[in-house]
Amino acid sequence: MLNYLVYRLLIMIPTLIAISLLIFTIIQLPPGDYFSTYIAELQAQGEAADPTKIEFLRQQYGFDKPIWEQYLFWVGGLLTGDLGYSFEYNLPVSAVVGDRLLLTFIVSLATLVFTYVLAFPIGVWSATHQYSWSDYTLTFLGFIGLATPSFLLALVLLYFANLWFGTSVGGLMDPEFVDQPWSVAKFLSVLEHLWIPTIVIGLSSTAGMIRRLRANLLDELQKQYVTTARAKGLHPVKALVKYPLRMALNPFIADIGSLLPELISGAAVVSVVLSLPTTGPMLLEALRSQDMYLAGSFLMFMATLTVIGVFLSDLALAALDPRIRLAGGAGR
Amino acid sequence: MTVAADERLPHYASPAPFDPYAVEAMTPEQERYFMASQWRMMWWKLRRHRLAVISGALLLFMYLVAAFCDFLAPYGLQTRNTDFIFAPPQRIHLWHRGEFVGPFTYGFDYRLDMRNLKRVYTENTERIYPVRFFCRGESYRLLGLFETDRHLICPGEGGTLFLLGTDRLGRDLLSRILYGAQISLTIGLLGVAVSFILGMVIGGIAGYYGGWTDVIVQRAIEVIQSFPQIPLWMALAAILPVTWSPLLVYFGITIILALIHWTDLARAVRSKLLSLREEDFCTAAVLMGASPARVIGRHLLPSFMSHLIASATLAIPGMILGETALSFLGLGLRPPITSWGVLLNEAQNINVVALYPWLMLPVVPVILVVLAFNFLGDGLRDAADPYR
């Protein structure tokens, strides 16, 4: 187990280096940099940019240096906790990201809980009632959830929430709470707005998870040990929960790793539609205006989170399932 | 206990000459079944999967519609009807005041509701416009080959035929959905083709050579998969220069979609190859001097091609949804190229949901196509599995 742990930890280092290279390439690929866009914009409006300030910033962030030096500068900053500077907001990246990150975290967590709470009982029910009308209905609903573009669902839910419950349109809280310190009323307001993004983001991953759990549990239920358990007269609930369910649970744990990027992805699109104060719209804006440190550091942050998530889910899996531990370094 | 001699059955011997292979000889049906090729077996199995067959038929129909959309659409892609902006869907009537007239539409009366600035169209039952069939309209090139101006269906003289309503420029939504099918349906296929090739080559190399190559490829796949998909798409799509022509952007988006999707296929190829290359027929091929490319391409890949095609089919809906999401965000395709995502981009506003809900209709074909590909892929996967 210790060997496996060390191996997994070590393998994370080259993975993260590769990810950082990839991100840096991506944000460097568009021609020009933020300043050339910025100057062009100012000139189009008939204004002149302050050349000394821009020259200062260019030097500060090493835009005049060769690419590899810029990369080292960026990564070095990341390692010491300096995420760089957002030109668009004129603030350090950490200051821009901070509050949004908390809200992103809240939304993701709520979605995760929603996904598991919904997918688990439905998946078990579908598998134990295979080919019943309830199974067909649930499977069909799951497919619809998989096929509906989430952004559109978000719009429709938003409209009806406004119509039926009077929830204010857009945002994650009522307008009067924005920029207010946290209070019970603000928290309640967030809760009131939270359910729409939670449902919308969670729906497609819930559908996928139901299908997988159903398939896994069905495979397990056909095995002989289940028949033996039944023949011995074991209580049906125990014959289901004790072994087959535990086996079918593995993908749930293994999925934490892949679920995280999925949730963040879904959240990115949906929050643009719902104008949530989370990180999705910010990333979109940063990519458009070539605010490279904001975009790059943020992408890096998400990728790191995911890598850690995969690591944790691998550990949990190894702890739960001895067969995987034996396979050792075979990886994911 | 003994049995009386006369109660026994009489001795019997067949006079026909003895045929030692009688048991092994097969009836024609049996022979057809046992000698069938892998693809034929797959087809037989697939035919039993009713949902998959229906989905396949639906997809075939949709691709046909996309191919012949010029002929089927009552209006052109960019035809503006400036008098009918945000007109609601029209119904085709058959009976006028208890009298059979044949398919026709009523005229529109237009008034601006000053309270909420909504355009209100009401049917004017005085004016009747019979729908024309196989009529002359705008000319186009059918399948890009023949110049013709025949359309399946046209509005009556001076009338309108907005079966799904119009958008903010007065363009007929049904026609636009039909034209959008061309882009939305092909982008998935093209993307899957690209990622199929990437996945086969990269997965093939990793699985065949193993060792270091395999480790590197595995890590690379892990890196790509640990990325949130849509932010990565967003970042890549933001790279595409604004100056590119819409057609180039279309290919760019296709390649971006493919660049992220090849990993699943590469994984499938790799794990299959890892086990298959230990088989005797593979060793035999190597001993006879076949090059690695030939061993992979001629001996290894065909043995699980059916499996690959099934997983490729399952990858298409993800790409279609991805294109829709990107175009919806304004990062994907841009007008004048029209895809379902571009059409939905216009439905981004909450006003649309409240006032002009028919602008959300392009989502219906998206859902249908995604579902159909999912069902077909599931059916193909079951059919490709020899152990079922």
Image (tube, rainbow, N blue to C red):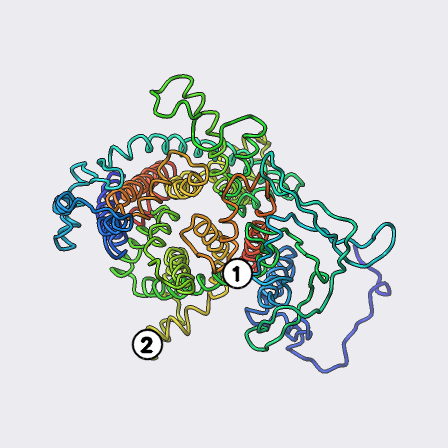
Q: Which residue is mark 2?
A: B291
Label 1 marks a residue whose chain is B
Q: Residue at x 58, y 30 (%)?
A: A163
Q: Position of residue B76 (x, y in %)?
A: 59, 63
Label 2 marks a residue whose chain is B
Q: Residue at x 52, y 60 (%)?
A: B185
Count neighbours of disc 1 (C-alpha within 10 A) and say few if under 14, some if 14 to 19, many if 20 or more. many
Q: Position of residue A50 (x, y in %)?
A: 17, 44
- Quadrant holding the N terminus of chain B: bottom right
Foreground disc of the pair 1, 2: 1
Q: Is residue B117 above or below residue B153?
A: above
- Determine whether, in the image, residue A122 is placed left or right of residue B213: right
Q: Secondary structure at mark 2?
A: loop
Closest to the observer, A81 or A331 = A81
Q: Is residue A181 above or below residue A34?
A: above
- Quadrant holding the C terminus of chain B: bottom right
Closest to the observer, B109 or B9 = B109
The mark tally for this picture is 2
- Determine whether, in the image, residue B255 is placed left or right of residue B315: left
Distance Cα–Cα, label 1 vs label 2 = 38 Å
Q: Is residue A15 visible?
A: no
Q: Residue furthest bottom?
A: B17
Q: Which residue is mark 1?
A: B185
Q: Position of residue A10 (x, y in %)?
A: 22, 45
Q: Are marks 1 and 2 on the same chain?
A: yes
Q: Secondary structure at mark 1?
A: helix
Give the residue type at disc 2.
Answer: Ser
Q: Is residue A296 above or below residue B379?
A: above
Q: Position of residue A181 (x, y in %)?
A: 33, 20
Disc number at residue A245? Answer: none
Q: Residue furthest top?
A: A184
Mark 1 or mark 2: which comes first in sequence? Answer: 1
